[in-house]
Structures are given as structure tokens and as C-alpha cells.
Image (cartoon, rainbow, N blue to C red):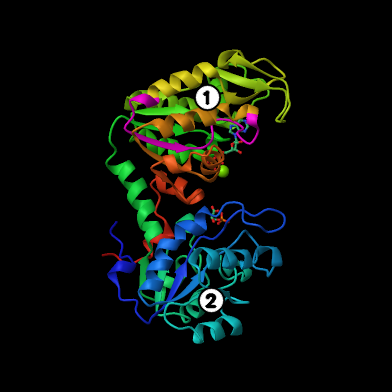
Amino acid sequence: MNKKTVRDIDVKGKRVLVRCDFNVPQDEEGNITDNRRIVSSLPTIKYLIENGAKVILCSHLGRPKGEVKKEFSLAPVAKELSKQLNIEVKLADDIIGESAKKLVSEMKDGEVVLLENVRFDAREEKNDPEFAKQLASLAEIYVNDAFGTSHRAHASTAGVADYLPAVSGFLIEKELDFMGNALENPARPFVAILGGKKVSDKIGVINALLEKVDTLIIGGAMAYTFFKAQGYGVGDSICELDKLDLALELLEKAKQKGVKLMLPVDTKVGKAPEKDTESKIVKCTEIPDGWEGFDIGPETIEIYKKELKDAKTIVWNGPLGLFEIDQFAIGTNEIAKALAESDAVTIIGGGDSAAAIEKAGLSDKMTHISTGGGASLEFLEGKKLPGIECLENK
Ligand code: ADP
Ligand code: 3PG
Ligand code: MG
């Protein structure tokens, strides 16, 4: 990575503002149901504590749309951080107000304060310069480690870098190292697996990956648009009728680039997206009316597994079926197992893909699971990420 990191600057005794992505899922009582984003932020926070910085953390949580809303408070995050770090992490009642200023002014070296949800102020998402300046005035150094929010040009992810020396944390460094390396110097064969709901969500990624991979495996609901485009009926499966030409173009592009583009051959169809719905396996070219494709079928699973056996680099984005329902999670789980058993470099991007692998209990078997949803997609597309662009070059 060509960006400076916390290692390249002297942080001792300095007030350091660290933007993290603590946007974690919670249940109805506000309990954090997946703390991976918090755990992934710890290396940078611990480094700063150990090196005598005063650590001022900030993040958004959810989309409170510029209003103070209790259910979007970072209080549960402060609690989880205190537990993980084994020191008290004080939560300010505001972002740049009296409470934040007071807590920051009282900080000693090695202490940690968390500001309230930056999206409680509408100026955050507008990247308002005055708000960014006030946020910056709390600190002497800015560290961005919020990889998951690095595709947003907001005050706390980008604007603040106009007013402070700005460097990257270890999480952003790690994400760029793993994903960047996989794209730039992949060990081959390089196989990408793309699933998820819509072709339109992933056009940019498909196009970018067609320039790099040897094989592109398609699964999930987006596969049906490719079958419809080739003139087959897809029953009630999710299908984007305005993307049929595009699907044909992508098939043609793959041919021209010499990329092996693989579509499922069989699919598990159901009557409705429900737990106990009646289901059966059919050929993808013979999906009957009144049925909806919810998973890749057993023959497809075998073909895909065989293709993955020789792969040296595998990038996966998007579940291969409606994995939230067990009877339609088989394709996703079987392919996750194949990755877990593979010697290839395995990289997972995308919020739902990461959740599916976590649900399958295979997270620690992957080389890298990105903490980014939208951010990792934009990275795979080759887009510039404002939260990273704003940091100082080495
Ligand atoms: P990611 O977050 O990993 O980028 P997406 O958001 O693109 O993935 O897609 C995930 C969603 O797609 C999941 O909610 C999953 O249930 C849904 N999905 C995948 N395949 C199907 C299918 N055949 N029918 C309906 N939904 C599907
Ligand atoms: C995410 O969960 O993808 C990030 O935290 C960004 O959240 P946003 O989509 O609300 O900007
Ligand atoms: Mg998703």
C-alpha cells in the first residue's frame, strides 16, 4: 500500500482521531449479533494505546439521517470495546459538543474515548467542511481505519483529512493488501464466484473481474437473468427483464476474453421463499411456471467444486442461493466448504457472503473476509475509495 500508516508517524502524547466502522448488526434489544467489525478494529486501537496516544474513536451506526435517535446510539459498541480492550471506553453524549470536548480535554495518554454516532449530525453525510473542521479540532492526527465506509465521502471518512495529518490504520492496510494483491498478482488459476440477487448490483464487478480471472462462476438469483436472456423460461425466479441484453453482452465478453463463464446446470426451485415450502430439483433450462429458483442444484455443486479444486486464487461475492432459509443454503454451504478445504488464497467480499460463511462456521478457514460490503464491491470494481484517497502517500 502506498499510503502512510500509524507506523509512519509519532503518536506519543498526541490526540488521535480514529474513524472506525462500528456499524454492527444488533438484535431488537440492542445486543450486538456480530462483533467482527469491532474485533477487526482492535489492532490499530491497541497499537495507539501501547504507543501512548490519546485515542478518540468515532463511527456511524445505521442510518439515523441526521437526527439523534436512541436506537442508533454507540453505547453497545462502547460496552463491547471496553470488554475487548479490558479498559473503560467512555462514550461522549455528542460528537463535537460540550460532552465530547470535556471528555477529550480530560484524557490521559493511553486512554480511549468514543464519540457518539457521527450520523446524528446531518452535516456528516454532506461532508460539510465546517463540521469536518470542528471534528478535526478535537485531535492532532487523523487515522482512518473504517474500510467498510471508505467508499463514502463523508466528513469523518474524508473531509477531516483536509485539516489534520491523515494516515491509515492496520485494518485498511490489511484489506488493501489482501484484496489488492489478489487482483494485481493472483496465483492462477484465478476463479471468481459471483452470486446474490441482482445482475444490476454486480455489473461493475463482473466487468472488472472479466479482465482478470480465468473462470467466472455464477450462482444466486442473478443466474436466472442469464437463462432468460438465452430464451429459456425461468418460472417465477428473480429476473431482471431490462438486463437481458446486458447478460448476453457479458456472455460475449467472457468469450472474447477467453474467460470460462460457468452458469448453473440445475437449480432447487420452491413454491415460495418460505421455510417449509415444497421444493424440487430441475434443470435450469426447464424451470416450470409457478416455481421459483432459490438455490443451485446438486449437479451444479459438483461441477463448481471440481472447478475450484485446481484454483489458486478464489474471490467470492454474493451467496449462491436464498441462504437465510436452510433448505436453500446448501449450495452456499457446500461451496463455502470447498473454499475452506482449498489451498487457494480465498477472499470473501460482501456483507451477506460474509454472514453466510459465518453462519456456516467457516470464517476462520478463509484467507481473508472483508469487513466491507459496498466498499469491497467498489474496491473489486477498481473504483477509487474517497476514505483512502484522502490519506497521505508514503
Ligand atoms: P453480498 O451482500 O454478499 O454482496 P448480495 O447483497 O448481492 O450479496 O445478495 C445477497 C442476497 O441475495 C441474500 O439475501 C440472498 O438470500 C439473496 N439470494 C441469493 N440467491 C437467491 C435466490 N436464488 N433467490 C432469492 N434470493 C437470493
Ligand atoms: C456498511 O455497512 O456497508 C457500511 O457501514 C456503510 O454503511 P452505509 O451503507 O449506511 O453508508
Ligand atoms: Mg448484500
Q: Describe residue 212's horizontal placement relative to residue 270 as left or right.
A: left
- In magenta segment, residue 320: yes
Q: Give the quadrant of ligand 3.
A: top right
Can the viewer see residue 260? no
- Label 2: how many residues lie within 10 Å, few (<14), some (14-19) or many (20+)? many
Picture layout, residue 113 above or below residue 253 = below
Q: Residue 252 sits in which quadrant?
A: top left
Q: Residue at x 67, y 15 (%)?
A: 288
Q: Residue at x 61, y 21 (%)?
A: 268
Picture layout, residue 370 above or below residue 143 = above
Q: Describe residue 350's horizontal placement relative to residue 179 as left or right.
A: right
Most foreground residue, 363 or 252: 363
Circle 2: element type: helix
> Residue 13 location, x and y as percent?
37, 82
> Residue 282 location, x and y as percent?
61, 14
Most foreground residue, 374 or 53: 53
Question: What range is drawn magenta here?
Answer: 308-326
- Asked whether the beta carbons under mark 1 and mark 2 sit within 8 Å of each other, the answer is no
Mark 1 or mark 2: name the one nearer the start of the chain. Answer: 2
Q: Amino acid at mark 1?
A: Phe
Q: Residue at x 56, y 20 (%)?
A: 297
Give the residue number, with chain letter if any, for mark 1. 226
Give the number of callouts. 2
Q: Describe residue 237's horizontal placement relative to residue 142 as left or right.
A: right
Q: Amino acid at mark 2?
A: Phe
Q: Residue at x 41, y 48 (%)?
A: 379
Give the residue number, with chain letter if any, for mark 2. 131
Q: Label for residue 10?
A: none
